[in-house]
Amino acid sequence: MKLKQPGRRRLALLAPAFALALIPFSTGTANANTSPGWGDDKPDVIWDCNHGKADSCQYHEVKAWTVLGKRRQVGNPVYNCAGSSPLGFDVTFRTDRTSSYSFQQETKVEVTSGFSDVLEGGMSASSSQTEKWEVGQTVSAGTTLRGTIQPHEAGGYWFAPYWRKSQGWLEVHYGKRNHGHYFWYYPGQGSTGVQINTPVMNSDGSMKGKWYWATWKC
């Protein structure tokens, strides 16, 4: 989707003042606006960007950082509850993660491939030679884990992925007035109401993260 650069004067005249601030969630109805936090008196910018109904959509990144995500158990635990000697094992695990999109940092909304391209285009590029991120791709982490479990114990592995978190806002332009205006800023100009979580990849394309091993009595 090609983005058009609006004239500064036109933008100042037509942008609604109340669209420049974060708008609290409304209770909504069955036919409520699907752009979280906006009432039916405003255009459904997320739906419009998903379906090519806007003249242009542009994601503006405000800030981004990398964080270690929550641990999740991978595979089944290995048991040596009735054993009388240590149990050695080799187990191959695989775990997948993909990008997620949330709006006003609370409500997740599915986006189309074209809309994800718009979001990706507004994100800053990686400056690291050892890791990268790509929006919309499913990234995997797999490894063969070797260990020993003592008698009357069980053990299992957990994996925590690194996430690249991007926060910003959407600038949406319509070719004709929509609800009285050409330009809409979601959920507010300069805000961080749009969040993109992208799994971080190593230089070889595998997902970056940490593996954890734990044992317990059984």
Image: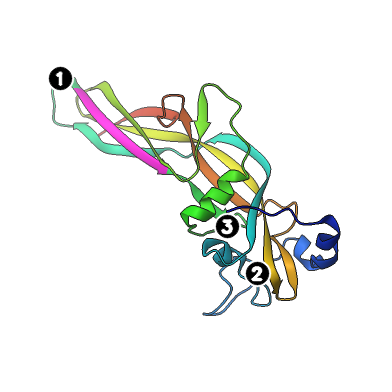
- Separation of marks 3 and 1 at Cα, in angstroms: 50 Å
Tag 2, which secondary structure? loop
- Asked if residue 142 can be seen in this view, the reply is yes
The C terminus: image quadrant: top left
Going from the N terminus, do you reach mark 3 or mark 2 first?
Answer: 2
Q: Which residue is mark 1?
A: 85
Q: Are marks 3 and 2 in contact (CB under 8 Å)?
A: no
x and y percent of residue 49 in the render? Answer: 57, 62
Q: CA distance from mark 1 to mark 2?
A: 63 Å
| 154 sits left or right of 32 in the view | left
Residue 206 in the image, given as x and y percentages of width and height: 40, 29
Q: Which residue is mark 2?
A: 38
Which picture quadrant has residue 16? bottom right
Residue at the image point whose x is 56% and y is 45% from the top: 120
Q: Which residues are magenta?
A: 89-97
Give the number of the mark in front: 1 or 2: 2
Closer to us: mark 3 or mark 2? 2
Q: Label 3, on which residue?
A: 106
Label 3, label 2: how many angstroms apart (C-alpha)? 13 Å
First-in-chain label (1 vs 2): 2
Residue 5 drawn at (x, y percent)? 73, 53
Q: Is residue 154 visible?
A: no
Amino acid type for the residue under numbered disc 1: Ser
User: At label 3, which amino acid type do we have?
Assistant: Glu
